[in-house]
Image (cartoon, grey):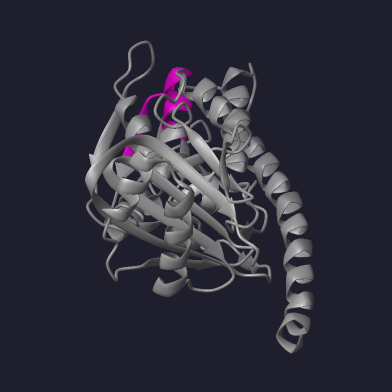
């Protein structure tokens, strides 16, 4: 733990901000958590390894029930088989469960301040950082996902780096007339895209991870194929779910990195980006939650160290993000190189 009495401000209450808040509070650091408008990305369905899900549970002090313990199915060869290694994750469900742990016993208090909008959240955090009484024992975590704080704080020399090989989320939400117990499904299609679905009672969310915006016709074709092989009860739920025309779309490069030139000599509170604010990876990489779990694992280890310093942790996380970004850049370059050949084939 850094010398002196540490306090922490966490900006953003998505999975990154919530996990970081719980890790700090469990280490005895009082936390103020700023909440803003919900991110549309929380309405997507993601893939996550079982090991990553367990790692997040260990970080926050409790298994994440309802996220990885329900049936998870993989479509393989026109059959449904149990998917053990890579369950599907409803990000909204994960966020709700993490938020429910904020008032848990046995750790330092977490004070939640609702800011209403993303701009109000960023302004509140910037005012906290500008307090002349802050020292290097104080920590501000940028978990906004859009690097809003590091883009504005203290005018750092900043580079926003993006890889090639863009990937796209296309998601729809529907309400089934006939409910079904919790279940998730996924399929890697011949086109290389991934189709994901999470069903929880009457609530059905489906996401396609692809290199383009997925049309309603493509969506309905997959739904029809899925219904054709589904057990009777699941088929009834699928056929009773209207999805409508509203599509939530999110396009991202293979990776986006916010790189700040040397912040080690700055005075006052330390600004530490984590999650997508540090390194945003596209769905095709499938490593966003694993990277977040690794970052928060380093945060927990740092809290347990007798003579740590937040600035040193920020530097270590930046170096890890640089290495991950380089790997993603190579993948993105390879995808871009193949694209012209695919178009002319």
Q: Is residue 140 above or below residue 150?
A: above
The N terminus sits in image quarter: top right
Q: Position of residue 239 (x, y in %)?
A: 31, 54
Residue 296 makes an appearance in the image:
yes
Residue at 43% from the left image edge and 26% from the top image edge: 22
Q: Nearer the viewer, residue 325 or 182?
A: 182
Q: Is 170 on the left-hand or right-hand side of 286? A: left
Q: Position of residue 240 (x, y in %)?
A: 26, 53
The C terminus sits in image quarter: bottom right
Can residue 22 be found in the magenta stretch?
A: yes
Q: Is residue 269 above or below residue 281?
A: above
Q: Nearer the viewer, residue 255 or 33?
A: 255
Q: Which residues are magenta?
A: 20-33
Q: Is 134 on the left-hand or right-hand side of 271? A: left
Can residue 70 be found in the magenta stretch?
A: no
Number of marks in picture = 0
Residue at 49% from the left image edge and 60% from the top image edge: 208
Q: Nearer the viewer, residue 56 or 32?
A: 56
Residue at 58% from the left image edge and 36% from the top image edge: 83
Residue 133 makes an appearance in the image:
no
Q: Is 272 on the left-hand or right-hand side of 345? A: left
């Amino acid at each position: 733990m850094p010398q002196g009495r540490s306090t922490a401000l966490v900006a953003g209450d998505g999975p990154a901000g919530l996990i970081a808040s719980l890790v700090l509070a469990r280490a005895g650091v009082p936390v103020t958590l700023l909440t803003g408008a919900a991110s549309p990305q929380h309405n997507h369905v993601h893939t996550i390894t079982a090991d990553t899900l367990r790692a997040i549970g260990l970080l926050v002090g409790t298994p994440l029930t309802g996220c990885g313990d329900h049936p998870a199915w993989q479509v393989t060869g026109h059959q449904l088989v149990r998917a053990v290694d890579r369950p599907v994750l409803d990000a909204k469900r994960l966020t709700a469960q993490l938020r429910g742990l904020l008032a848990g016993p046995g750790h330092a208090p977490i004070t939640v301040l609702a800011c209403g909008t993303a701009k109000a959240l960023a302004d509140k955090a910037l005012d906290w950082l500008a307090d002349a009484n802050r020292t290097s024992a104080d920590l501000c975590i940028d978990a906004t996902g859009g690097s809003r704080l590091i883009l504005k704080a203290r005018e750092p020399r900043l580079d926003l780096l993006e890889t090639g090989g863009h990937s796209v989320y296309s998601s729809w939400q529907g309400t089934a007339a006939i409910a079904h117990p919790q279940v998730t499904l996924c399929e890697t299609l011949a086109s290389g895209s991934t189709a994901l679905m999470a069903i929880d009672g009457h609530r059905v969310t489906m996401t396609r991870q692809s290199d383009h915006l997925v049309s309603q016709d493509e969506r309905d074709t997959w739904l029809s194929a899925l219904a054709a092989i589904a057990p009777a009860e699941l088929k009834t739920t699928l056929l009773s779910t209207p999805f409508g025309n509203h599509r939530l779309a999110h396009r991202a490069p293979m990776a986006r990195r916010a790189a700040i030139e040397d912040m080690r000599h700055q005075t006052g509170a330390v600004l530490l980006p984590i999650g997508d604010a540090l390194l945003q990876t596209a769905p095709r990489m499938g490593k966003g939650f694993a990277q977040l779990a690794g970052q928060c694992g380093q945060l927990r280890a740092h809290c347990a160290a007798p003579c740590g310093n937040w600035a040193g942790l920020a530097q270590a996380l930046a170096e890890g993000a640089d290495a991950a970004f380089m790997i993603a850049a190579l993948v993105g370059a390879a995808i871009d190189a193949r694209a012209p050949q695919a178009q002319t084939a």
